[in-house]
């Protein structure tokens, strides 16, 4: 080991510690010794050795690694270790990141995340938000299924769900007692969505839900018989009765199609066919108002058919100059519909012409001298 030679001086100087000077082989040996401390996680010893090397050569490097980097790593590893021992996870996480120790940083990050989630669950429970707390515990179980606390989280989650579901169960039972079947079904459905096997006080939410569901279906059937088809359909949908929903949907499609066809036939003046359709439509309505609506349409079409028959009968007789027969037909038609008209000629004018021609024929047959009548245009 070399020592620095100094000349004697009369000037007083304070004592100064002279740092030893190491050869390259000695620095290499120190570096290896420091590296061994790092491997064995003796961070303080490692930091001290690498600080010694750095004091002599700030850029000392071996095998691509500098003494400065290893000193810094040892320093932050020690800080992280101390922080972990006192439960300061945030400080430990930051130190591990500074030390480029990403494996331990990830482990601490998980611990920190778990700690935050557990705190969040506990705060939710204190605030009475049991369902929110259950979701947090479920999150923990999903992300960390192998964690040593997994069984504890599972128990707490079940307890939270029980506490969260109990109010719905009470509401459902009270609704059953009041025969409010739809409200009861909805309350139990809230429970079964989360826990299909929920039960308390020896009673199963699933069995009570099915009881309420049957009553809702019976009520919907009654609504259907009363003609309240859409209300019934809504009730079937609430309880998910697929068969009833399909039947009612098909019924509504059929009824709409028949209504459209009947209206088109009536617009085209096909009275008999329209009346037949309206008669069928009357059978597709359960309520009196619905049946009355289409029965009135049947009567309207039958009336129009009768008018058409009288008009055609009158015109057929008129064209064949059977005036008396034509006059009778037009007279019956006018009693039913005084303003009846087809084309440009009102029936009242046809009736008047047929009646005068009938009278003229009678005079001709008796006197061979017909009276003067208007033989001009009918219109």
Image (tube, grey):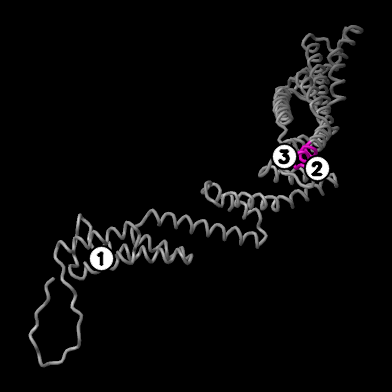
Residue 320 horizontal/vertical position (percent): 79, 8
Please give the range of residues in magenta: 203-213
Q: Nearer the viewer, mark 1 or mark 2?
A: 1
Left or right side of 256 for 291: right
Q: Circles 1 and 3: CB distance less than 8 Å?
A: no
Residue 206 quadrant: top right
Q: Which residue is mark 3?
A: 238
* Residue lying at 20% horizontally and 80% vertically, measured from the top left: 17
Residue in the foreground of this view, choosing between 235 and 341: 235
- The mark found on residue 181 in the picture is 2
Lower position in the chain sequence, tag 2 or tag 3: 2
Q: Is residue 30 visible?
A: yes
Residue in the foreground of this view, choosing between 157 and 99: 99
Q: Estimate how packed mark 3 is, as few (under 14), some (14 to 19) or many (20 or more) residues with alpha carbons within 10 Å.
A: some
Label 1 and label 3: CA atoms lie apart by 74 Å
Residue 292 horizontal/vertical position (percent): 84, 30
């Amino acid at each position: 080991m070399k020592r620095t030679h100094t000349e004697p001086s009369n000037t007083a100087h304070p004592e100064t510690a002279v740092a030893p000077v190491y050869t390259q082989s000695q620095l290499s040996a120190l570096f290896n010794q420091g590296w061994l401390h790092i491997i064995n996680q003796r961070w303080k010893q490692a930091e001290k050795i690498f600080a010694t090397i750095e004091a002599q050569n700030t850029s000392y490097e071996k095998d691509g690694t500098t003494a400065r980097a290893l000193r810094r790593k040892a320093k932050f590893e020690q800080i992280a270790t101390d922080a972990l021992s006192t439960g300061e996870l945030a400080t430990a996480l930051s130190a591990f990141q500074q030390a480029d120790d990403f494996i331990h940083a990830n482990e601490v990050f998980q611990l920190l995340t778990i700690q935050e989630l557990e705190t969040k669950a506990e705060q939710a429970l204190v605030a009475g938000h049991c369902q929110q707390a259950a979701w947090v515990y479920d999150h923990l179980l999903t992300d960390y299924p192998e964690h040593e606390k997994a069984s504890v989280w599972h128990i707490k989650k079940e307890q939270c769900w029980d506490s969260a579901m109990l109010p719905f169960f009470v509401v459902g039972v009270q609704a059953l007692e009041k025969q409010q079947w739809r409200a009861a079904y909805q309350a139990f459905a809230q429970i079964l969505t989360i826990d299909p096997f929920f039960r308390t006080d020896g009673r199963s939410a699933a069995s009570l839900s099915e009881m309420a569901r049957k009553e809702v279906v019976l009520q919907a059937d009654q609504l259907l018989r009363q003609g309240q088809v859409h209300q019934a359909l809504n009730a079937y949908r609430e309880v998910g009765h697929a068969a009833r929903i399909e039947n009612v949907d098909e019924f509504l499609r059929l009824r709409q199609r028949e209504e459209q066809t009947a209206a088109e036939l009536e617009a085209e003046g096909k009275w008999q066919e329209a009346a037949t359709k309206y008669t069928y439509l009357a059978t597709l309505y359960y309520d009196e108002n619905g049946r009355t609506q289409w029965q009135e349409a049947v009567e309207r079409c039958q009336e129009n058919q009768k008018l058409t028959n009288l008009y055609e009968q009158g015109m057929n007789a008129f064209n064949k100059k059977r005036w008396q027969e034509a006059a009778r037909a037009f007279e019956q038609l006018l009693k039913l519909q005084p303003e009846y008209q087809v084309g440009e000629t009102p029936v009242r004018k046809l009736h008047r012409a047929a009646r005068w021609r009938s009278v003229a024929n009678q005079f001709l047959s008796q006197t061979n001298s017909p009276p003067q009548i208007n033989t001009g245009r009918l219109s």
